[in-house]
Image (cartoon, coloured by chain):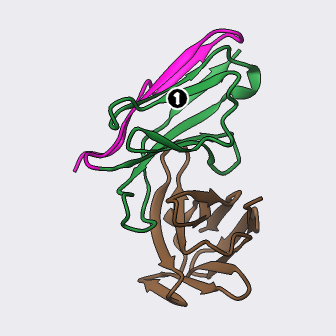
Chain colours: A brown, B green
């Protein structure tokens, strides 16, 4: 069935370093790849997304890359700050407006 | 723009009892989703509505869970009877849908259910 794998499950980085989270999807019909940030006890919030006709997208310190051939996409956060600490979820969406979420990555930015 | 509203925010029940959750999506959003998020895991889709019709309920445990969106706006999710493993946060989300291509889902604050 449809599946999204996400790695790593936990990630600790020093403040100012970069963080990279990777996801792999199985459904070749997927054409939309959002990333959500979820702080403890709060709702998931979209931080960046990319569509299948684009290979890379950047928004300030956050970037996402997509490799359609390999069916994987990655989130890159540069110059990490303590407020970046949260759980990050990737998802793969298709034409039925359905998302399959990854299992999440708990990012800790150490001051 | 008002966000997705959910109530109640918290609910504690005993196993075998019934519970219902309510969701009001963003105005004009055709697609509504109910997710179950168990602690430490990603959201798992339970059911997806397009207006008042069900698009996907393949992961909804239909022997105990039911959901409706009668007028294509508000939605309710019911569990009857509840089991211990139903303890989770139930998230409602909505998106524009309706032929505009896959697009952003906006999440509500969730209902944290504890089954004792």
**What is the span of residues highlighted in magenta in the rendered image?**
B1-28
**The quarter of the displayed image where residue A74 is located:** bottom right
Is residue B3 covered in magenta? yes
Of all chains, the one bearing label 1 is B
Classify B59 as above or below A68: above
Front one among B99 and A93: B99
Which residue is located at x 70 percent, y 80 percent? A71
**The quarter of the displayed image where residue B71 is located:** top left
**Image quarter (top left, top right, bottom left or bottom right) of the C terminus of chain A:** bottom right
**The quarter of the displayed image where residue A22 is located:** bottom right
Q: Secondary structure at mark 1?
A: strand
Residue A65 relative to residue B104: left or right: right
Percent of width and height locating residue A81: 52, 71
Which residue is located at x 70 percent, y 88 percent? A69
Asked if residue A76 can be seen in this view, the reply is yes
Residue receiving disc 1? B67
Please identify the residue farthest to the front as the structure is shown.
B53
Which residue is located at x 68 percent, y 19 percent? B115
Asked if residue A78 can be seen in this view, the reply is no
Percent of width and height locating residue A44: 50, 53
Q: How many marks?
A: 1
Is residue B21 covered in magenta? yes
Which residue is located at x 35 percent, y 49 percent? B30
**Image quarter (top left, top right, bottom left or bottom right) of the N terminus of chain A:** bottom right
Q: Residues within 10 Å of mark 1 (few under 14, many from 20)?
A: many
């Amino acid at each position: 069935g449809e599946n999204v794998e996400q790695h790593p499950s936990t990630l600790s980085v020093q403040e100012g370093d970069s963080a990279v989270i990777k996801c792999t999807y199985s459904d070749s019909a997927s054409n939309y790849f959002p990333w959500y940030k979820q702080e403890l006890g709060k709702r998931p919030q979209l931080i960046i997304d990319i569509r299948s006709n684009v290979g890379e997208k950047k928004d300030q310190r956050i970037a996402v890359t997509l490799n359609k051939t390999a069916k994987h996409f990655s989130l890159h956060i540069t110059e990490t700050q303590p407020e970046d600490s949260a759980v990050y979820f990737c998802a793969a969406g298709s034409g039925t407006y359905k998302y399959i979420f990854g299992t999440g990555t708990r990012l800790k930015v150490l001051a | 723009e008002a966000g997705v509203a959910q109530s109640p925010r918290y609910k504690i029940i005993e196993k075998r009892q019934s519970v219902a959750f309510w969701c009001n999506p963003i105005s004009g959003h055709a697609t509504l989703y109910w997710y179950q998020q168990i602690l430490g895991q990603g959201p798992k889709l339970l059911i997806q509505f397009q207006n008042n019709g069900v698009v996907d309920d393949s992961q909804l445990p239909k022997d105990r869970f039911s959901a409706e969106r009668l007028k294509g706006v508000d939605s309710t999710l019911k569990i009857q009877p509840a089991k211990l493993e139903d303890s989770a946060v139930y998230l409602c989300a909505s998106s524009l849908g309706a032929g505009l291509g896959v697009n952003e889902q906006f999440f509500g604050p969730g209902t944290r259910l504890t089954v004792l």
